[in-house]
Image (cartoon, rainbow, N blue to C red):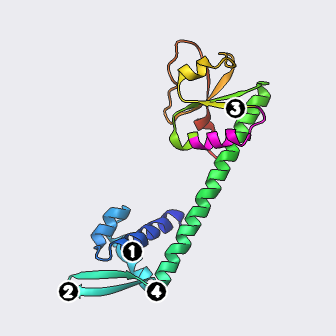
Amino acid sequence: MQAQHLSKELAILNYIEENSQATQRDLSAFTGVSLGTVNLVLKRMVKHGWLKIERMQPNSVKYFLTPSGIANKIERTYAYLVRTYNEIERLQARIVTIANALATRSELEQIFFYGQEYELDEMIDNLISNESFIVPAKFYHTLEELKADPSYHKEIPVLLISKESQTPQSKEEVQWINLMGMLRV
């Protein structure tokens, strides 16, 4: 079964746990899958014993997660967290590899990072504080901060962390290396 399909099932389990009176239309809108697919997934969940359906009126039902359904939801959530942690570890290793290769190739005494991507900022700050790079590294959020650093000069390449395809505008030439484009693992 595809990972995306499994995440839709987890989304359905989560939504039902929070909204037992949800309709199949609600679930379809929440998950972004067709009404027919929601119906099939719900039948599958009932067949596996993860879900009970109680008919309230002829045209309305109430969904309940069974103990087995709760356990399945916990297992899926745990698996998701493990995959996310592994992806973070892989991304951190890729950043270190790229930065260290640049430092070695260019014989740098220091690595400079620049950008304003919140999640990556924290990750790189953590790598810097753990001294993960072969040379000292600094992270800057503004060009003014970067240019004010006495150890920086325009011949030193700067690893750019930005989702935007364009590099920041600067009056002085900066050798930008788009780290985001290199991070595809």
Q: Are marks 4 and 3 in contact (CB under 8 Å)?
A: no
Residue 185 at least partly seen: yes
Q: Nearer the viewer, mark 3 or mark 2?
A: 3
Element at badge 2? loop
Q: Earlier in the sequence, mark 2 or mark 1?
A: 1
- Region in magenta: 122-135
- Alpha-carbon span between mark 2 and mark 1: 22 Å
Foreground residue among 123 and 179: 123
The amino acid pointed to by label 1 is Glu
User: Which residue carries the number 2 mark?
Assistant: 58
Task: Give coordinates of residue 59: x percent, y percent.
Answer: 20, 82
Q: Are marks 3 and 2 in contact (CB under 8 Å)?
A: no
User: Which residue carries the number 4 mark?
Assistant: 49
Q: Earlier in the sequence, mark 4 or mark 1?
A: 1
Q: From the viewer's perspective, is residue 169 above or below residue 65?
A: above
Q: Nearer the viewer, mark 4 or mark 3?
A: 3
